[in-house]
Protein backbone atom coordinates (compact mmCIF):
# COMPACT_ATOMS: atom_id res chain seq x y z
CA UNK A 1 0.00 0.00 0.00
CA UNK A 2 2.85 2.29 0.86
CA UNK A 3 4.52 1.53 -2.49
CA UNK A 4 1.28 2.29 -4.28
CA UNK A 5 1.02 5.68 -2.53
CA UNK A 6 4.63 6.56 -3.40
CA UNK A 7 4.04 5.54 -7.00
CA UNK A 8 0.93 7.73 -7.18
CA UNK A 9 2.83 10.71 -5.70
CA UNK A 10 5.62 10.23 -8.21
CA UNK A 11 3.10 10.04 -11.02
CA UNK A 12 1.41 13.23 -9.82
CA UNK A 13 4.75 15.06 -9.68
CA UNK A 14 5.63 13.95 -13.25
CA UNK A 15 2.18 15.03 -14.43
CA UNK A 16 2.64 18.42 -12.73
CA UNK A 17 6.06 18.83 -14.33
CA UNK A 18 4.66 17.89 -17.74
CA UNK A 19 1.79 20.36 -17.35
CA UNK A 20 4.19 23.13 -16.30
CA UNK A 21 6.48 22.35 -19.22
CA UNK A 22 3.53 22.43 -21.59
CA UNK A 23 2.36 25.76 -20.16
CA UNK A 24 5.92 27.14 -20.40
CA UNK A 25 6.16 25.96 -24.00
CA UNK A 26 2.81 27.51 -24.90
CA UNK A 27 3.85 30.81 -23.27
CA UNK A 28 7.20 30.82 -25.09
CA UNK A 29 5.50 29.96 -28.37
CA UNK A 30 2.99 32.79 -27.81
CA UNK A 31 5.81 35.25 -27.06
CA UNK A 32 7.66 34.06 -30.15
CA UNK A 33 4.52 34.54 -32.26
CA UNK A 34 4.20 38.10 -30.95
CA UNK A 35 7.91 38.74 -31.55
CA UNK A 36 7.59 37.48 -35.13
CA UNK A 37 4.47 39.53 -35.81
CA UNK A 38 6.09 42.73 -34.50
CA UNK A 39 9.17 42.23 -36.67
CA UNK A 40 7.65 40.72 -39.82
CA UNK A 41 4.13 42.26 -39.71
CA UNK A 42 2.51 38.87 -40.43
CA UNK A 43 1.32 35.77 -38.56
CA UNK A 44 4.00 33.07 -38.36
CA UNK A 45 1.86 30.05 -39.28
CA UNK A 46 0.32 31.73 -42.34
CA UNK A 47 3.44 33.66 -43.34
CA UNK A 48 4.45 34.09 -46.96
CA UNK A 49 7.84 32.56 -47.67
CA UNK A 50 9.65 35.79 -48.39
CA UNK A 51 13.13 36.94 -47.55
CA UNK A 52 13.90 36.82 -43.84
CA UNK A 53 14.76 40.13 -42.17
CA UNK A 54 17.99 38.67 -40.84
CA UNK A 55 18.92 37.74 -44.43
CA UNK A 56 18.35 41.37 -45.42
CA UNK A 57 20.70 42.35 -42.60
CA UNK A 58 23.33 39.95 -43.95
CA UNK A 59 23.00 41.37 -47.46
CA UNK A 60 23.15 44.93 -46.13
CA UNK A 61 26.42 44.16 -44.33
CA UNK A 62 27.77 42.48 -47.46
CA UNK A 63 28.41 38.97 -46.11
CA UNK A 64 28.77 36.40 -48.88
CA UNK A 65 27.58 33.05 -47.57
CA UNK A 66 28.44 30.96 -50.62
CA UNK A 67 32.22 31.31 -50.68
CA UNK A 68 34.84 33.09 -48.58
CA UNK A 69 37.02 34.32 -51.45
CA UNK A 70 35.34 34.59 -54.85
CA UNK A 71 37.71 37.11 -56.43
CA UNK A 72 40.75 36.00 -58.39
CA UNK A 73 43.75 38.13 -59.36
CA UNK A 74 43.77 39.00 -63.06
CA UNK A 75 46.89 40.16 -64.97
CA UNK A 76 45.03 42.95 -66.82
CA UNK A 77 41.90 43.83 -64.85
CA UNK A 78 43.23 43.61 -61.28
CA UNK A 79 40.73 40.95 -60.26
CA UNK A 80 37.71 39.06 -61.59
CA UNK A 81 35.30 36.53 -60.10
CA UNK A 82 35.98 32.81 -59.77
CA UNK A 83 34.74 30.91 -62.82
CA UNK A 84 31.45 29.12 -62.17
CA UNK A 85 30.63 31.06 -58.98
CA UNK A 86 27.03 32.00 -58.05
CA UNK A 87 25.34 29.55 -60.45
CA UNK A 88 21.66 30.05 -61.23
CA UNK A 89 20.65 26.76 -62.83
CA UNK A 90 17.20 28.00 -63.82
CA UNK A 91 18.56 30.93 -65.83
CA UNK A 92 21.87 29.22 -66.75
CA UNK A 93 23.55 32.24 -65.22
CA UNK A 94 27.03 32.03 -63.65
CA UNK A 95 30.48 33.58 -63.73
CA UNK A 96 31.91 32.88 -67.19
CA UNK A 97 35.47 31.83 -68.00
CA UNK A 98 36.54 35.47 -68.28
CA UNK A 99 35.40 36.17 -64.69
CA UNK A 100 32.14 38.06 -65.31
CA UNK A 101 28.63 37.09 -64.14
CA UNK A 102 26.86 36.56 -67.42
CA UNK A 103 24.61 34.40 -69.58
CA UNK A 104 27.31 34.35 -72.24
CA UNK A 105 30.95 33.49 -72.81
CA UNK A 106 33.16 36.22 -74.27
CA UNK A 107 33.78 37.25 -76.93
CA UNK A 108 30.13 36.83 -77.88
CA UNK A 109 29.69 36.57 -81.64
CA UNK A 110 26.47 37.65 -83.31
CA UNK A 111 24.44 34.77 -84.71
CA UNK A 112 22.20 37.06 -86.77
CA UNK A 113 22.14 40.68 -87.94
CA UNK A 114 19.06 41.47 -85.89
CA UNK A 115 20.96 41.16 -82.61
CA UNK A 116 21.82 44.39 -80.80
CA UNK A 117 24.78 43.85 -78.49
CA UNK A 118 24.93 46.15 -75.46
CA UNK A 119 28.04 46.12 -73.26
CA UNK A 120 27.62 47.25 -69.65
CA UNK A 121 30.70 48.62 -67.85
CA UNK A 122 31.30 49.77 -64.27
CA UNK A 123 31.25 48.47 -60.70
CA UNK A 124 28.62 46.72 -58.59
CA UNK A 125 25.79 49.13 -59.45
CA UNK A 126 26.42 48.54 -63.15
CA UNK A 127 26.74 44.81 -62.47
CA UNK A 128 23.35 44.84 -60.71
CA UNK A 129 21.91 46.68 -63.71
CA UNK A 130 23.11 43.90 -66.04
CA UNK A 131 22.04 41.07 -63.73
CA UNK A 132 18.61 42.67 -63.27
CA UNK A 133 18.27 42.52 -67.06
CA UNK A 134 19.15 38.82 -67.10
CA UNK A 135 16.47 38.13 -64.50
CA UNK A 136 13.65 40.52 -65.48
CA UNK A 137 14.49 41.74 -69.04
CA UNK A 138 13.43 45.10 -67.67
CA UNK A 139 15.91 47.18 -69.67
CA UNK A 140 15.45 45.38 -72.99
CA UNK A 141 11.66 45.67 -72.66
CA UNK A 142 12.00 49.42 -72.15
CA UNK A 143 14.28 49.76 -75.19
CA UNK A 144 11.96 47.64 -77.32
CA UNK A 145 9.04 49.90 -76.40
CA UNK A 146 10.64 52.41 -78.80
CA UNK A 147 10.14 51.81 -82.55
CA UNK A 148 13.89 52.04 -83.18
CA UNK A 149 14.50 48.88 -81.12
CA UNK A 150 11.09 47.16 -81.37
CA UNK A 151 12.25 44.30 -83.59
CA UNK A 152 15.75 43.89 -82.16
CA UNK A 153 17.04 40.92 -80.21
CA UNK A 154 18.85 42.73 -77.41
CA UNK A 155 21.87 40.95 -75.94
CA UNK A 156 23.31 42.36 -72.70
CA UNK A 157 26.97 41.60 -71.97
CA UNK A 158 28.12 42.23 -68.41
CA UNK A 159 31.70 43.56 -68.17
CA UNK A 160 31.29 44.73 -64.56
CA UNK A 161 32.46 43.57 -61.16
CA UNK A 162 32.07 44.98 -57.66
CA UNK A 163 34.64 47.66 -56.89
CA UNK A 164 35.67 48.33 -60.49
CA UNK A 165 36.64 51.94 -61.17
CA UNK A 166 38.37 53.79 -63.95
CA UNK A 167 40.65 52.97 -65.68
CA UNK A 168 39.44 49.36 -65.27
CA UNK A 169 36.44 49.96 -67.55
CA UNK A 170 38.77 51.39 -70.21
CA UNK A 171 41.19 48.46 -69.94
CA UNK A 172 38.39 45.88 -70.11
CA UNK A 173 36.87 47.57 -73.17
CA UNK A 174 40.21 47.57 -75.00
CA UNK A 175 40.93 43.94 -74.11
CA UNK A 176 37.66 42.55 -75.41
CA UNK A 177 37.69 44.70 -78.52
CA UNK A 178 41.16 43.25 -79.20
CA UNK A 179 39.65 39.76 -78.85
CA UNK A 180 37.07 40.63 -81.50
CA UNK A 181 34.07 41.45 -79.33
CA UNK A 182 31.38 43.20 -81.34
CA UNK A 183 29.32 45.95 -79.69
CA UNK A 184 26.48 48.17 -80.88
CA UNK A 185 26.10 50.19 -77.67
CA UNK A 186 28.35 50.60 -74.63
CA UNK A 187 26.94 51.83 -71.32
CA UNK A 188 29.23 52.89 -68.48
CA UNK A 189 27.60 53.47 -65.07
CA UNK A 190 30.07 54.86 -62.54
CA UNK A 191 31.07 57.74 -60.27
CA UNK A 192 30.73 56.30 -56.78
CA UNK A 193 33.63 53.84 -56.88
CA UNK A 194 35.90 56.40 -58.51
CA UNK A 195 35.64 58.81 -55.60
CA UNK A 196 34.86 56.47 -52.67
CA UNK A 197 37.38 53.71 -53.41
CA UNK A 198 40.11 55.85 -54.99
CA UNK A 199 40.01 57.99 -51.85
CA UNK A 200 40.66 54.84 -49.79
CA UNK A 201 43.57 54.00 -52.11
CA UNK A 202 45.07 57.40 -51.43
CA UNK A 203 44.66 57.07 -47.67
CA UNK A 204 46.31 53.62 -47.81
CA UNK A 205 49.28 54.96 -49.79
CA UNK A 206 48.38 53.00 -52.93
CA UNK A 207 48.43 54.63 -56.37
CA UNK A 208 45.00 56.14 -57.07
CA UNK A 209 44.77 54.49 -60.49
CA UNK A 210 45.28 51.01 -59.08
CA UNK A 211 42.28 48.72 -58.44
CA UNK A 212 40.40 49.21 -55.17
CA UNK A 213 42.63 48.59 -52.16
CA UNK A 214 39.65 46.97 -50.42
CA UNK A 215 39.48 44.30 -53.10
CA UNK A 216 43.03 43.81 -54.33
CA UNK A 217 45.08 44.09 -51.13
CA UNK A 218 43.69 40.96 -49.43
CA UNK A 219 44.25 38.97 -52.64
CA UNK A 220 47.82 40.14 -53.09
CA UNK A 221 48.56 39.51 -49.42
CA UNK A 222 47.45 35.90 -49.86
CA UNK A 223 49.39 35.54 -53.13
CA UNK A 224 52.53 37.03 -51.60
CA UNK A 225 52.18 34.74 -48.57
CA UNK A 226 52.94 37.62 -46.22
CA UNK A 227 49.96 37.22 -43.91
CA UNK A 228 50.81 36.55 -40.29
CA UNK A 229 49.72 33.28 -38.65
CA UNK A 230 47.22 35.34 -36.65
CA UNK A 231 45.68 36.72 -39.84
CA UNK A 232 45.48 33.25 -41.38
CA UNK A 233 43.76 32.05 -38.20
CA UNK A 234 41.23 34.88 -38.56
CA UNK A 235 40.50 33.77 -42.14
CA UNK A 236 39.72 30.28 -40.85
CA UNK A 237 37.46 31.77 -38.17
CA UNK A 238 35.62 33.91 -40.74
CA UNK A 239 35.12 30.89 -42.99
CA UNK A 240 33.78 28.76 -40.13
CA UNK A 241 31.38 31.54 -39.05
CA UNK A 242 30.05 31.72 -42.61
CA UNK A 243 29.35 27.98 -42.60
CA UNK A 244 27.44 28.36 -39.34
CA UNK A 245 25.52 31.34 -40.73
CA UNK A 246 24.49 29.40 -43.82
CA UNK A 247 23.30 26.50 -41.65
CA UNK A 248 21.33 28.95 -39.49
CA UNK A 249 19.67 30.55 -42.52
CA UNK A 250 18.72 27.12 -43.89
CA UNK A 251 17.22 26.20 -40.50
CA UNK A 252 15.16 29.41 -40.45
CA UNK A 253 13.50 28.36 -43.69
CA UNK A 254 12.38 25.03 -42.23
CA UNK A 255 11.24 26.04 -38.72
CA UNK A 256 7.68 24.84 -38.08
CA UNK A 257 7.33 26.61 -34.73
CA UNK A 258 7.69 30.30 -33.92
CA UNK A 259 9.88 29.38 -30.95
CA UNK A 260 12.33 27.57 -33.25
CA UNK A 261 12.38 30.62 -35.53
CA UNK A 262 12.97 33.04 -32.63
CA UNK A 263 15.82 31.02 -31.13
CA UNK A 264 17.48 30.48 -34.52
CA UNK A 265 17.14 34.20 -35.37
CA UNK A 266 18.94 35.11 -32.15
CA UNK A 267 21.66 32.56 -32.94
CA UNK A 268 22.11 33.99 -36.44
CA UNK A 269 22.30 37.55 -35.11
CA UNK A 270 25.03 36.48 -32.70
CA UNK A 271 26.90 34.84 -35.57
CA UNK A 272 26.64 38.09 -37.54
CA UNK A 273 28.23 39.94 -34.60
CA UNK A 274 30.94 37.28 -34.43
CA UNK A 275 31.58 37.70 -38.14
CA UNK A 276 31.88 41.48 -37.91
CA UNK A 277 34.26 41.21 -34.97
CA UNK A 278 36.37 38.68 -36.87
CA UNK A 279 36.55 41.02 -39.88
CA UNK A 280 37.68 43.93 -37.70
CA UNK A 281 40.28 41.67 -36.09
CA UNK A 282 41.50 40.46 -39.49
CA UNK A 283 41.78 44.02 -40.87
CA UNK A 284 43.79 45.04 -37.84
CA UNK A 285 46.13 42.07 -38.25
CA UNK A 286 46.65 42.77 -41.96
CA UNK A 287 47.53 46.40 -41.23
CA UNK A 288 50.08 45.21 -38.70
CA UNK A 289 51.76 42.92 -41.25
CA UNK A 290 55.46 43.56 -41.79
CA UNK A 291 55.82 46.31 -44.44
CA UNK A 292 59.46 45.34 -45.10
CA UNK A 293 58.34 42.39 -47.25
CA UNK A 294 57.15 44.72 -50.07
CA UNK A 295 60.34 44.38 -52.14
CA UNK A 296 60.10 40.58 -52.14
CA UNK A 297 56.41 40.42 -53.04
CA UNK A 298 55.54 38.40 -56.14
CA UNK A 299 52.52 40.63 -56.90
CA UNK A 300 53.55 44.25 -57.42
CA UNK A 301 51.27 47.06 -56.33
CA UNK A 302 52.84 50.48 -56.92
CA UNK A 303 52.83 52.63 -53.81
CA UNK A 304 52.22 56.37 -53.94
CA UNK A 305 55.12 58.64 -53.06
CA UNK A 306 52.96 60.16 -50.37
CA UNK A 307 49.35 60.50 -49.28
CA UNK A 308 47.96 63.39 -51.30
CA UNK A 309 46.01 66.23 -49.67
CA UNK A 310 42.30 65.89 -50.37
CA UNK A 311 42.11 68.62 -52.99
CA UNK A 312 45.03 67.25 -55.01
CA UNK A 313 43.74 63.68 -54.62
CA UNK A 314 40.25 64.43 -55.88
CA UNK A 315 41.58 66.54 -58.75
CA UNK A 316 43.70 63.57 -59.82
CA UNK A 317 40.79 61.17 -59.40
CA UNK A 318 38.49 63.36 -61.50
CA UNK A 319 41.16 63.88 -64.16
CA UNK A 320 41.72 60.11 -64.51
CA UNK A 321 37.98 59.51 -64.66
CA UNK A 322 37.59 62.22 -67.32
CA UNK A 323 40.47 60.96 -69.46
CA UNK A 324 39.23 57.37 -69.23
CA UNK A 325 35.76 58.31 -70.43
CA UNK A 326 37.21 60.42 -73.25
CA UNK A 327 39.35 57.46 -74.34
CA UNK A 328 36.40 55.04 -74.24
CA UNK A 329 34.36 57.43 -76.35
CA UNK A 330 37.14 57.92 -78.90
CA UNK A 331 37.81 54.20 -79.27
CA UNK A 332 34.13 53.37 -79.64
CA UNK A 333 33.34 56.32 -81.93
CA UNK A 334 36.12 55.24 -84.31
CA UNK A 335 34.26 51.93 -84.63
CA UNK A 336 30.86 53.64 -84.98
CA UNK A 337 29.73 52.25 -81.61
CA UNK A 338 27.65 54.59 -79.46
CA UNK A 339 28.97 55.25 -75.95
CA UNK A 340 26.81 56.36 -73.02
CA UNK A 341 28.25 57.45 -69.67
CA UNK A 342 25.95 57.67 -66.62
CA UNK A 343 26.89 59.08 -63.22
CA UNK A 344 25.06 57.08 -60.58
CA UNK A 345 23.12 58.56 -57.65
CA UNK A 346 24.35 57.85 -54.13
CA UNK A 347 22.80 58.45 -50.72
CA UNK A 348 25.88 60.21 -49.35
CA UNK A 349 25.83 62.90 -52.05
CA UNK A 350 23.17 65.33 -50.87
CA UNK A 351 20.34 66.09 -53.27
CA UNK A 352 16.69 67.02 -52.71
CA UNK A 353 15.76 63.43 -51.90
CA UNK A 354 13.89 62.82 -48.64
CA UNK A 355 14.89 59.44 -47.25
CA UNK A 356 12.24 57.04 -46.00
CA UNK A 357 12.30 55.68 -42.46
CA UNK A 358 13.51 52.36 -43.87
CA UNK A 359 16.38 54.08 -45.70
CA UNK A 360 17.40 55.97 -42.58
CA UNK A 361 17.61 52.58 -40.88
CA UNK A 362 19.43 50.50 -43.51
CA UNK A 363 20.99 52.89 -46.02
CA UNK A 364 22.54 55.67 -43.97
CA UNK A 365 25.64 54.52 -42.14
CA UNK A 366 27.30 57.40 -40.33
CA UNK A 367 30.45 55.31 -39.97
CA UNK A 368 30.67 54.40 -43.65
CA UNK A 369 34.23 54.66 -45.02
CA UNK A 370 32.76 56.01 -48.27
CA UNK A 371 31.15 59.21 -46.98
CA UNK A 372 34.25 61.41 -47.22
CA UNK A 373 35.06 60.32 -50.77
CA UNK A 374 31.51 60.88 -52.00
CA UNK A 375 30.99 64.26 -50.32
CA UNK A 376 34.34 65.66 -51.44
CA UNK A 377 34.69 63.81 -54.72
CA UNK A 378 31.29 64.02 -56.41
CA UNK A 379 31.36 67.81 -56.82
CA UNK A 380 34.76 67.54 -58.53
CA UNK A 381 33.52 64.84 -60.90
CA UNK A 382 30.38 66.80 -61.70
CA UNK A 383 32.48 69.86 -62.55
CA UNK A 384 33.88 67.82 -65.47
CA UNK A 385 30.50 66.99 -67.02
CA UNK A 386 30.37 70.07 -69.27
CA UNK A 387 33.88 69.36 -70.52
CA UNK A 388 32.92 65.78 -71.33
CA UNK A 389 29.87 66.97 -73.22
CA UNK A 390 31.95 69.50 -75.18
CA UNK A 391 34.32 66.66 -76.08
CA UNK A 392 31.41 64.78 -77.63
CA UNK A 393 30.74 62.28 -74.82
CA UNK A 394 27.12 61.30 -74.20
CA UNK A 395 27.40 61.81 -70.46
CA UNK A 396 24.38 62.00 -68.15
CA UNK A 397 24.34 63.33 -64.60
CA UNK A 398 21.98 60.95 -62.83
CA UNK A 399 22.56 62.02 -59.23
CA UNK A 400 19.03 63.45 -58.93
CA UNK A 401 17.01 60.71 -60.63
CA UNK A 402 15.77 59.21 -57.34
CA UNK A 403 14.67 62.52 -55.81
CA UNK A 404 11.01 62.32 -56.79
CA UNK A 405 10.51 58.69 -55.73
CA UNK A 406 8.80 58.57 -52.34
CA UNK A 407 9.30 54.82 -51.88
CA UNK A 408 12.46 53.22 -50.50
CA UNK A 409 15.05 52.88 -53.28
CA UNK A 410 18.33 52.09 -51.46
CA UNK A 411 18.87 48.62 -50.01
CA UNK A 412 22.17 48.93 -48.14
CA UNK A 413 24.62 51.35 -46.56
CA UNK A 414 26.89 51.45 -49.60
CA UNK A 415 25.31 52.43 -52.88
CA UNK A 416 22.92 49.77 -54.18
CA UNK A 417 19.26 50.05 -55.20
CA UNK A 418 16.27 47.79 -54.62
CA UNK A 419 13.79 46.86 -57.35
CA UNK A 420 12.12 50.29 -57.19
CA UNK A 421 15.48 52.03 -57.59
CA UNK A 422 16.43 49.69 -60.42
CA UNK A 423 13.21 50.60 -62.21
CA UNK A 424 14.03 54.31 -61.98
CA UNK A 425 17.57 53.74 -63.23
CA UNK A 426 16.30 51.62 -66.12
CA UNK A 427 13.84 54.35 -67.12
CA UNK A 428 16.58 56.96 -67.03
CA UNK A 429 19.12 54.96 -69.01
CA UNK A 430 16.68 53.77 -71.67
CA UNK A 431 15.12 57.22 -72.21
CA UNK A 432 18.58 58.80 -72.42
CA UNK A 433 19.74 56.22 -74.97
CA UNK A 434 16.75 56.75 -77.24
CA UNK A 435 17.18 60.55 -77.15
CA UNK A 436 20.75 60.23 -78.43
CA UNK A 437 19.79 57.64 -81.05
CA UNK A 438 17.02 59.87 -82.40
CA UNK A 439 19.18 62.98 -82.30
CA UNK A 440 21.91 61.31 -84.33
CA UNK A 441 19.56 60.34 -87.18
Image (tube, rainbow, N blue to C red):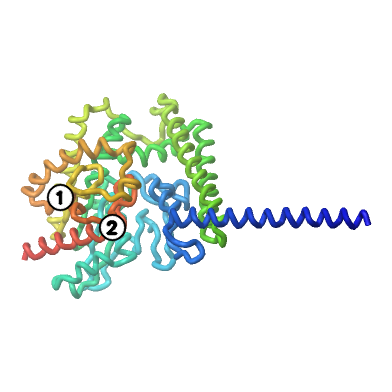
- Residue 436: where, in percent of width, then height? 10, 61
Residue 257 sits in quarter: bottom right
Closest to the observer, 242 or 50 = 50
Where, quadrant-wise, is the C terminus in this rendering?
Answer: bottom left
Residue occupying image coordinates x 21% and y 72% = 152
In this view of the protein, can residue 170 be seen by the observer?
A: no
Query: Vertical placement of 108 versus 235: above or below?
Result: below
| Of callouts 2 and 1, the N-terminal one | 2
Classify mark 2: helix, strand or loop.
helix
Residue 86 sits in quarter: bottom left
Closest to the observer, 144 or 25 = 25
- Residue 211: where, in percent of width, then height? 31, 41
Query: Vertical placement of 206 versus 62: above or below?
Result: above
Closest to the observer, 133 or 56 = 56
Q: Residues within 10 Å of mark 1 (few under 14, many from 20)?
A: some
Query: Vertical placement of 298 versus 60: above or below?
Result: above
Where, quadrant-wise, is the N terminus in this rendering?
Answer: bottom right
Q: CA distance from mark 2 to mark 1?
A: 17 Å
Classify mark 1: helix, strand or loop.
strand
Q: Of the numbered discs in the image, which one, if any, rests on residue 129?
A: 2
Residue occupying image coordinates x 92% and y 54% = 2
Image position of 323 (left or right of 246): left
Image position of 213 (left or right of 113): right
Count the marks: 2
Image position of 390 (left or right of 215): left
Image position of 285 (left or right of 174): right
Q: Of the numbered discs in the image, which one, if any, rests on residue 397?
A: 1
Amino acid sequence: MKDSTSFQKGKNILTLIAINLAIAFICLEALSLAFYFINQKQFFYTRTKGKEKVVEDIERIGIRLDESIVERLHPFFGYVLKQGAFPNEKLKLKVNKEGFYSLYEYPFIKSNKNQLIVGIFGGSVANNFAVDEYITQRFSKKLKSYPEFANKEIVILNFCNGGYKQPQQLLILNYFLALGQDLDLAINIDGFNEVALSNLNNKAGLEIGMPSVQHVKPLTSLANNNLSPEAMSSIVQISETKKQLKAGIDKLQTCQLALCHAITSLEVKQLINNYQQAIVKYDRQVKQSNPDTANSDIVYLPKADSVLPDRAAFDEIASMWYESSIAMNQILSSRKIKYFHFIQPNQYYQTKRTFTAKENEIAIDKNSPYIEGVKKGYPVLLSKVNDLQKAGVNVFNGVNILDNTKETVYKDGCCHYNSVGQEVLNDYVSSSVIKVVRKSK
